[in-house]
Image (cartoon, grey):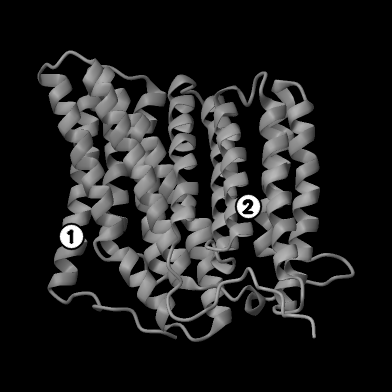
């Protein structure tokens, strides 16, 4: 009798904990986030922002797809661990190419990105062979087809001239981001079902929370490293304190109750289809707004530290736009992971205050230091507002499952 093949999939018994190899993998993305922040800071223009946003969408997609895969795979199994380390190598190479992705290292970026996406999916198909999860096997067949198509555009973009590269990569990003919403529909193979995804929601929630910590940590590192190189005078010390308080407020807004309440909702959700939909919408898509906001805030903090007295239009847009993007992402995330009829009122009020600040900044000739102080104050108000509302019982203590 032939012995049963050892499965590479997780044994679902309670909460699937994040493995140390997954955390080790995340270290690569500390470097990636730093590279993106520096790239945006050095190319602070409309074109530079568009290019950096495109690169950020790619980095996030690589990370979140890997998190979905390790939601199913057991990272303590040697083949899975080796796959994660191979992705780490590719991620490190890709991160190194980010500053020159629209110059001489475009082909490296395109080839590595395509190889990581296709290679990881092929590994997942190999792990799913044997019929333990036939629905998910068919799901990954469709995913492999979608990512193979987008891979062509990643490589063609790398081969194209830098001026036209953005068009090829926009098509590639559009294909990849449309896939989950289209349920990876393939002619002749049909479409996937949310029930096939069989997500372990608490694990994915924990993974995304750790990525937020990585992004916030990168912001703190940039602030500290920049401040250490500057002359310590009243303006730089004030900018340093403002940046730190803003980072603390951002942590508070996400982690005080929002992340825990979302995890509770996922754990209480017994309908697999609903859980998979929430995982797709709240974590796969909406978290990119939150992380993107942190990246822009890191750029803004460095601008305020280095140029506390003057900033151009792009700098002002970063100082106000970073907190706005972060608050928008957190508001939508909390909206879809709770039983709220509307997004959190405190977050909406914060967005209105930031909009008012943007309108007043030019007529009042506010300096970057004052703008940074105002945005940090707004974030602190939002954090305190929601905390007080929860502590006083004005909001439900814990979300109920549907």
**For residue 171, above or below residue 276:** above
**Residue occupying image coordinates x 41% and y 71%:** 337
* For the residues bearing labels 2 and 1, Cβ distance under 8 angstroms: no
Pick whichever, 320 or 261, lies toward us: 261
**For residue 117, above or below residue 392:** above
Pick whichever, 193 or 352, lies toward us: 193
Please tell me whether mark 2 sits on a helix, a strand or a loop: helix
**Residue occupying image coordinates x 48% and y 72%:** 201
**What residue would you read off at disc 1?**
385
- Residue 349 location, quadrant: bottom left
Q: Is residue 366 visible?
A: no
- Crowding at dot 1, Cα within 10 Å, few <14 / some 14-19 / many 20+, comes out as some
Q: In this rendering, would 109 be left or right of 388?
A: right
**What residue would you read off at disc 2?**
83
- Residue 303 location, quadrant: top left
Where is residue 304 drawn, in percent x and y?
Answer: 26, 25
Where is residue 350 drawn, in percent x and y?
Answer: 27, 51
Q: Quadrant of the C terminus?
A: bottom left
Mark 2 or 1, nearer chain start: 2
Outermost residue on the top side: it is 231
Viewer-side label of 2, 1: 2
Please tell me whether mark 1 sits on a helix, a strand or a loop: helix
Pick whichever, 24 or 109, lies toward us: 24
Outermost residue on the right side: it is 188
Where is residue 387 drawn, in percent x and y?
Answer: 18, 63
């Amino acid at each position: 009798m032939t012995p049963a093949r050892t499965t590479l999939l997780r044994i679902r018994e309670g909460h699937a904990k994040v493995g140390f190899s997954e955390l080790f993998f995340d270290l690569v993305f500390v470097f990636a986030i730093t590279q993106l922040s520096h790239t945006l800071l050095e190319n602070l223009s409309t074109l530079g922002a568009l290019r950096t946003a495109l690169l950020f969408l790619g980095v996030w997609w690589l990370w979140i797809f890997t998190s979905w895969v390790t939601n199913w795979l057991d990272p303590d199994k040697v083949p899975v661990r080796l796959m994660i380390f191979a992705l780490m190598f590719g991620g490190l190479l890709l991160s190194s190419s980010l500053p020159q992705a629209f110059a001489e290292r475009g082909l490296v970026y395109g080839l590595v990105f395509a190889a990581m996406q296709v290679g990881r999916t092929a590994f997942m198909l190999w792990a799913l062979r044997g019929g333990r999860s036939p629905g998910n096997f068919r799901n990954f067949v469709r995913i492999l087809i979608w990512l193979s198509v987008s891979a062509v555009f990643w490589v063609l973009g790398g081969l194209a001239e830098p001026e036209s590269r953005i068009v090829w990569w926009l098509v590639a990003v559009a294909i990849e981001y449309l896939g989950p919403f289209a349920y990876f529909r393939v002619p002749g193979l049909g479409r996937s079902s949310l029930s096939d995804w069989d997500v372990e929601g608490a694990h994915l929630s924990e993974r995304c929370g750790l990525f937020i910590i990585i992004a916030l940590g990168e912001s703190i590192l940039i602030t500290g490293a920049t401040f250490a190189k500057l002359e310590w005078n009243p303006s730089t010390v004030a900018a340093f304190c403002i940046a730190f308080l803003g980072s603390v407020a951002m942590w508070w807004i996400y982690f005080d109750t929002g992340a825990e309440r979302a995890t509770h909702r996922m754990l209480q959700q017994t309908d697999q289809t609903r859980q998979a939909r929430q995982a797709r919408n709240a974590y796969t898509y909406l978290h990119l707004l939150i992380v993107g906001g942190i990246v822009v805030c890191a750029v803004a903090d460095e601008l305020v530290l280095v140029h506390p007295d003057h900033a151009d239009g792009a700098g002002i847009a970063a100082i106000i736009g970073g907190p706005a993007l972060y608050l928008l992402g957190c508001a939508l995330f909390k909206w879809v992971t709770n039983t709220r009829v509307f997004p959190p009122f405190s977050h909406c009020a914060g967005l209105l205050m930031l909009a008012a600040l943007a309108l007043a900044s030019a007529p009042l000739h506010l300096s970057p230091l004052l703008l940074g102080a105002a945005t940090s104050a707004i974030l602190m108000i939002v954090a305190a507002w929601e905390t007080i509302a929860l502590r006083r019982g004005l909001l439900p203590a814990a979300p109920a499952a549907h």
